[in-house]
Amino acid sequence: MKFPSIFRVNQPHRFQITPRHYDPVKEEIHQRTERIKRELQQEGILDPEGDDADRPNSFRGGSSIRGAFTQGSPIKRKPSSLFESTGMIRLIIMIILIGGFGGYIYLGPEVLYYFLYLGGAIAALVALFRLKSVGTK
């Protein structure tokens, strides 16, 4: 409830604008689809009254929207490889960072060479297994 006052309090002004955009490509696509619809209706291939029933996005009484978002979701898809899992990649990065920091504290800058040799060995093993799998196909 507002109390009467002799002072005028400024109210924020509302700025309402409706944007008008002209997209010639979209307009051309719309005209082309309307022309094709008219041609198909004249040939009898498309039903003149039920053209909205053919659209997959139209609402038909009992639509099957339940579960529609989770079926095609990439989140529900199980990773096919160990390195596609983001949690596993985070764990590997965390182990490398903690190992590098701890190794630097205990061994000094020599630990950087150890990590370089270890990384080279792992890269060579990965390349060897990939070449081996390509050669067996």
Image (cartoon, helix red, strand yellow):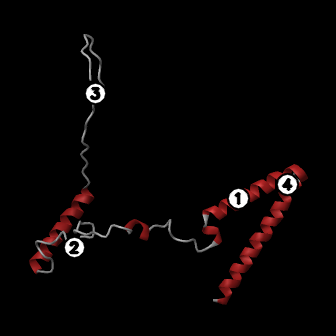
CA distance separating discs 4 and 2:
65 Å
Question: Could you tell me which secondary element the residue under label 1 belongs to?
Answer: helix
**Nearer-the-camera pick, 100 or 72:** 72
Closest to the observer, 50 or 35:
50
Packing grade of label 1 (10 A; few <14, some 14-19, many >=20) is few
- Residue 93 numbered tag: 1
For the residues labelled 1 and 3, the Cα–Cα distance comes to 52 Å
User: Which numbered disc flags the more N-terminal residue, 3 or 2?
Assistant: 3
Quadrant housing residue 66: bottom left
| Marks 1 and 4, how far apart at CA | 15 Å
Q: 87 left or right of 123?
A: left
Q: Name the residue under label 2.
A: 54
Q: Is mark 3 on a helix, strand or loop?
A: loop
Do the numbered discs 4 and 2 sit on residues whose CB atoms are within 8 Å? no
Name the residue carrying label 4. Answer: 103
Instruction: Name the amino acid type tagged 1.
Output: Ile
How busy is the neighbourhood of tag 3: few (under 14 within 10 Å), some, or many (20 plus)? few
Sequence-wise, which precedes: disc 4 or disc 3? 3
Residue appearing at x 27%, y 66% in the figure = 57
Q: How crowded is mark 2: few (under 14 residues within 10 Å), some or many (20 or more)?
A: few
**Dot 3 corresponds to which residue?**
13
Tell me the element at label 4. Answer: helix
